[in-house]
Every structure is written in structure tokens, then in C-alpha cells.
Image: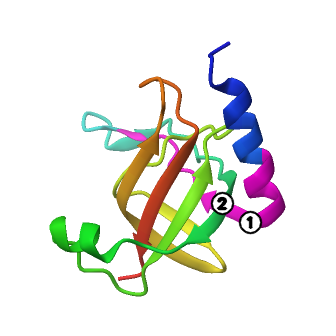
Amino acid sequence: MGQYDAVAQRALAAITRKGGPVTFPGTGTPPTYDPATDTWSGGAAGADVVGRAVQIDGDPDRFAALNLVLVNPVTLMVAASGLTVTPAVGMLFTWGGLTYSLKDKEEVKPDGQTPIIYVVTGSTG
């Protein structure tokens, strides 16, 4: 048990009360191609991961510094506790009925190891 687990749990509880669900679609495992038999085998569909998030204002100065061009941007504070996926740039996520491509991510991890929240910014274009 990490020293910030209780803080992560409180963050999850607060975000759950004030926010809504954010879905990270499952990526699964792609099938393997066998050129000798010209067949595909294996692979598995990925399960969607649903976390809890609250929408916050984005930081235009940060976006400019990173040379990000965003279409219909959204910035979310996502609770890390219980989230079975680590958000990464390039991933898709669904918030409020729209699908976004994750363009920027910051992690809040006071001990350098245990994330408490992720701040993610997505773009529809």
C-alpha cells in the first residue's frame, strides 16, 4: 500500500460525486498473420475501461508551448484510483458522447510513483 493511496481514493470519491464517466475503448490484441498458410489467428477484442472524470479549463499557454492544434478541445481531470489503463497520447477516449484523441497528458504523482490524477486533453480533429 502506497503512502498516497488514501489521497487517490479521496480524489476518486470527489471526482465521482462531481463528474461523469470517461471511457477508454479497448485496444485488444491484434491477430497474428501466418504467411505460410495465408491465415490469421489469435487476437482478442479489448474491453472498454470506464473511469471517472471532471471537465476543467485547459491551459492555452501549455497548448501553444507544445505546438498543439486542437479541434473542439476538452481537458479532463481523471481519477487514477481503480483505473486499469494508463492514459497515453494517441489513445481515444469518450466524454459526453464525443470521441476524442488524447493529445496531452500530465500526471499528478506526489511520490513520483503513484498517480493520483491524470489531466488529459483531447481533440476531436
Which is nearer the N-term, disc 2 or disc 1? 1
Q: Mark 1 = which residue?
A: 19
The CA span between labels 2 and 1 is 5 Å
Residue at 32% across, 36% down: 37
**Magenta extent:** 13-32
Q: Which residue position holds label 2?
A: 53
Give 121 or 58, whichever is nearer the viewer: 58
Q: In this view, does 17 lie to the left or right of 21?
A: right
Q: Which amino acid does label 1 sit on?
A: Gly
Q: Say above or below: 34 vs 88.
A: above
Asked whether 81 falls inside the magenta stretch, the response is: no
Up the image or down, 42 lies above or below 124; here it is above
Quadrant location of the C terminus?
bottom left
The reply to whether residue 12 is in sight is yes
Q: Which is nearer the eye, 34 or 32?
A: 32
Q: Where is residue 88 in the image (x, y as percent from the top left)?
A: 39, 49
Measuring from the top left, give residue 52's x and y in whole percent: 70, 55
> Would you identify the image quadrant in which residue 21 lies?
bottom right
